[in-house]
Amino acid sequence: MKSSKPLQLVFAIGAMALTLLLLQQGFLFLRDASVSKIVIVVFAIVWGVGGVALLYTVANWIVELLPEEWAARIQPIVFVGPGLALLFWFLAIPVFRTLILSFRGPNGDGFDGIDNYVFAFTDRVMLEAFRNNLLWMVFGASFCVGLGLIIAVLADRSKYEAVYKAIIFMPMAISFVGAGVIWKFVYTYKGEGSGISEIGLLNAIVLALGGQSQPWLLIPPWNNFFLIAIMVWLQTGFAMVILSSAIKGIPAELLEAARIDGANEFQIFFRIIIPSIQGTLITVTTTIVIFSLKLFDIVRVMTGGNNGTNVIANEFYLQRFTYGDAGQASAIAVILLVAVIPVMIYNLRQFRESRAF
Amino acid sequence: MNTKKTSLDRQKKLSNFFVNFVLILICIIWIVPTLGVFVTSFRNSQNIFQSGWWTVFPHREYVKTGEIKIPEDVDVDGPITVNGVTRTFEEWRAGVLMPDGTQLTWFGNKRTRQIDVQTLQWQWFETDLTLENYINVLSGKEIRFKDGSGNEIVRQGNDLSAAFLNSIAVAVPATIIPILIAAFAAYGFAWMNFPARKFLFTIVVALLVVPLQIALVPILQDYTKLGINGTFLGIWLAHAGFGLPLAIYLLFNYINQLPRDILESAFIDGASHFTIFTNLILPLSVPALASFAIFQFLWVWNDYLVGLIFLGEQNRVLTMALAAIVGEKGQDWHLLTAGAFISMILPLTVFFALQRFFVRGLLAGSVKG
């Protein structure tokens, strides 16, 4: 048995080489083949998922054939290594690479000093984007959390809680682009003229109430709020679900005792419910604030950032992919990163306190 | 005593009514925009441009029932008398409600000398609903439809069927691959000993909130060098990389909680790490795996930015195809609404079928930005 181990090892290494060859051939086939789309899809799924599973299996096979001392040392690399490699390649190292790029010129060469940051903090378009992101963070987050909290508290008292919550939660499954189409249709504007009837819901309501129809997405600064409404529609469900589970965690005896002592519903809400779920409230608010900081799709699809609706993430995209300035784009990305550092520190502190290790 | 009880009951009923009233109102606001898109996607393209989607439901509206010609000798710049009512041209054009309940509206400009007689009539459900919009938007071939004025338009289809298949080819592996990688890593962090274990996990936690914009510029450089820009492999890796911090974090929290004695007895029986992982840990972790799977699937399916940057036109996914229709022909509501619904069908199904798991994943992962 023992003597055949080296032979097995040769087999295993051969299998690894074969796997790699197979994967490479699969890649070439996917890239160059001009067969029916369905064949491509099925092949891509099998190749991608199967390939990863195969790599792990064969790598483990090799490791288990090694002498015990070596196996114990190498096995963690097989388990944790691929994950960490991807993390370092896609997130950790890019932090530093982007930082370096942010001091370079449009093509990633030369040295521009702090020019890109001077642009980022003084350019008129950037200042407008900062202002708009502030609007998104303040109004978007407070509406999402406020509305989510109200719905969570109210739904808790209704028999039909599950139905209400499912409806409010539903937009979470819809893409921002899809939501963009849905709301663009609500805001659509045809203009005045004889024989024209508005087909957008908002304008039809305004007309029915005796007002004038408006091109809602073209009126700064209010158009920002019409875009923020879309995010509120999308994200209130998220806030509601998390707050709702926190509210259900409040001991029933506590609420009962307060009621017996004669507290009314508002006192219960402000003096018991809010303080009990304070931690969750902070987490949810932070999550949505970060989310609105990085917001891109809604603005991209609805207005492209025109008419005073630009945001930082859209300006990042424009700088890199429309104007081709990698340096300025990198500076904007670094600013986004710096803005979330307090949350990162908070998360790390929580992690250290949790003593999971 | 008794009166107090009934008054309490009444108060309770009242507050119950109030609660449900407010919630129903909010739910209506939440659902009506989507309903509008859903209804519109089945309407005839010409109707979409002419009337709001709510007109498919029974309602009363003014329908033209006759015409009145204004004789040539009437001065249209002064007051005009029709059927005993005298108004100016502007007022006639805005529409005048007559004593007999009909509405008279001047048609066109002053020279037409024509007034339409309109009567308020009940309209039943709109009946010419069609699947044509879906067929048109799915097709990659030439399509024909009528615009608001009834002109036939011929143009290249948006080929959403190809985009749908691409979305599947992107989303399925981009969900399973990171889960597999993260599960191995989470097991390693939870049950193996290696140097810098804690430090490396701290990095995972730190990366939870890093905005992916930070990675796009350098990763694109790498992809161009490696020649995987625009390929499925490239986008799987990108989605895997961006999804891994949360995946490892969630799965570690779960696997770390599993009772240690199961593992120890398996070790004593001589099982290897790999056997324990595949035969014991993976089956035990199904709830956590499912939670993250739904999370990641919805995220990848609905993603626009990563696809826009790493996938070219030839492999474009649904969100990109839909955004392209918005960009090119922002007013083609018959195509946009049908396209939007096609992009929503799968995530909505997954979402409602597996909502329980999704909520659990959300609750566990609310540290991520």
Image: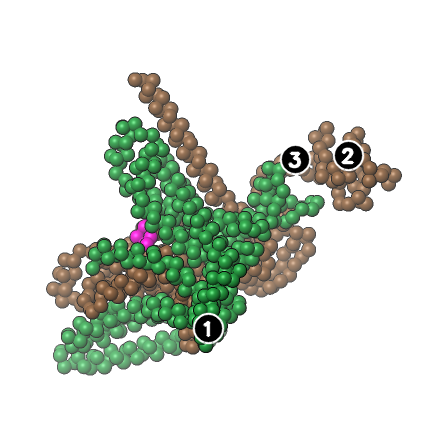
> On screen, A344 above or below B121?
below
Query: Mark 3: which secondary structure?
Result: strand
Q: Quadrant of residue A114?
A: bottom left
Chain B colour in the picture? brown
Label 3 neighbour load within 10 Å: few <14, some 14-19, many 20+? few
Can residue A356 be seen in the rendering of this structure? Answer: yes
Task: Count numbered badges in the picture.
Answer: 3
Q: Nearer the viewer, residue A330 or A72?
A: A330
In the rendered image, residue A220, in percent from the top left (x then y), is placed at 56, 51
- Say which residue label 3 marks: B121
> On screen, B358 above or below A4?
above
Numbered badge on residue A112: 1
Numbered badge on residue B274: none
Do dots 1 and 2 share one subunit? no
Q: Nearer the viewer, residue A251 or A355?
A: A355
Task: Give the magenta range.
Answer: B363-367
Residue at 68%, 53% in the rendered image: B150
> On screen, B318 above or below B148?
below
Q: Nearer the viewer, residue B260 or A107?
A: A107
Does the magenta-highlighted stretch encompass residue B290?
no
